[in-house]
Each structure stands twice: as structure tokens, then as C-alpha cells.
Amino acid sequence: AALLDKRDPQRQAATGDTINRTASLGVPTGNSATLSQSEIDALRAQIQACWNPPPGSLDSRDLVVQVRLQLNRDGSVSAEPQVLNRGSHPQFQVAAEAARRAIRRCAPYKMPLAKYDIWKDVEVTFDPREMYRG
């Protein structure tokens, strides 16, 4: 009995309907930091600099490509970018390959190292109408 720790617990476990209010840094399931809009815009700008959408795609909603991007701590691409959606437009495959090529070409990305757990695995939407709206 003398060896038991009689201090109050520092952290409460979440069970059922209770939520753990103790702050947790660096994990996606805790109260970790999120990317600010300017950091998201910075990533978008880095990719946009290397992206060449197919000609005539600026007004096509059928050429919106969603890509999963996995990064290493140094901003390099850790896995082949995965296209998450499909399109019926004849040039969708061309647009999808252009998006994947842009991700590989622009690496390494400059992102805040303190928020690595957030940006190590992100989804990017390539929309010709949004990327060039000014």
C-alpha cells in the first residue's frame, strides 16, 4: 500500500459521453493546432506554380480533381499522389495526371514543421475555376 501513487491523476480518460478536455498537442484526435487559411493558401500557391491544367479547362466543373498528398517532414512527397475522384469528362485523366505531376514537380513544400501532424497527409482539390480566379 505504501507504493501506491496517491496523487490526483493528471489526465482523465474519455469514456462514453464524456470528453477529455485536457489539451493535447500534435495529434490529429486531440485539441491540436490546425492550419491557418494563410498556410493553406501558401500550400495552394506552391502547387499552383507548377500546375498546368489542360487547355480549355478553365470553365469546366467536370475537371475538378481531388488528390491525396502524403509528405515527409522535410516537405518532400512520401508516397505517390492518389486521385480520389473520377470524372466523366474526356480530359479528366489528363487533368488528373497534370495534378499529380504538379505535386511531384513542386516538392519539397515549405510548411510549418510544428504542424507536421496536420499536413503530413492532406487532400488537395484541383479546380481550374478556383486556381486562377485571381
Image: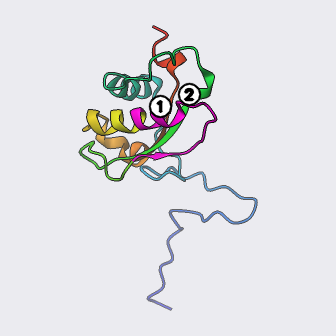
Report whether 35 appears left or right of 19: left
- Residue type at mark 2? Leu
State the image coordinates of residue 39 (x, y, percent, origin top left).
40, 27
Against 14, residue 116 (above or below) is above
Q: CA distance from mark 2 to mark 1?
A: 6 Å
Label 2, residues with CA under 10 Å away: few <14, some 14-19, many ≥20: many
Which image quadrant is residue 134 in? top left
Query: Please, which residue is most extreme toward the right here?
Result: 17
x 53%, y 51%: residue? 30
Against 55, residue 89 (above or below) is below
First along the sequence among labels 2 and 1: 2
Which image quadrant is residue 47 in? top left
- Residue type at mark 1? Ala
Against 58, residue 13 (above or below) is below
Which residue is tagged 1?
95
Please report contact status of discs 2 and 1: CB closer than 8 Å, yes or no.
yes
Secondary structure under the numbered disc 1 in the rendered image: helix
Secondary structure under the numbered disc 2 in the rendered image: helix
x 47%, y 24%: residue? 37
Q: Which residue is more in the foreground, 122 or 24?
A: 122
Which stretch is magenta? 81-98
Label 1, residues with CA under 10 Å away: few <14, some 14-19, many ≥20: many
Residue 10 in magenta stretch = no
x 31%, y 35%: residue? 111
Report whether 65 appears left or right of 76: right
Which residue is tagged 2?
63
Query: Please, which residue is most extreme toward the bottom here?
Result: 1
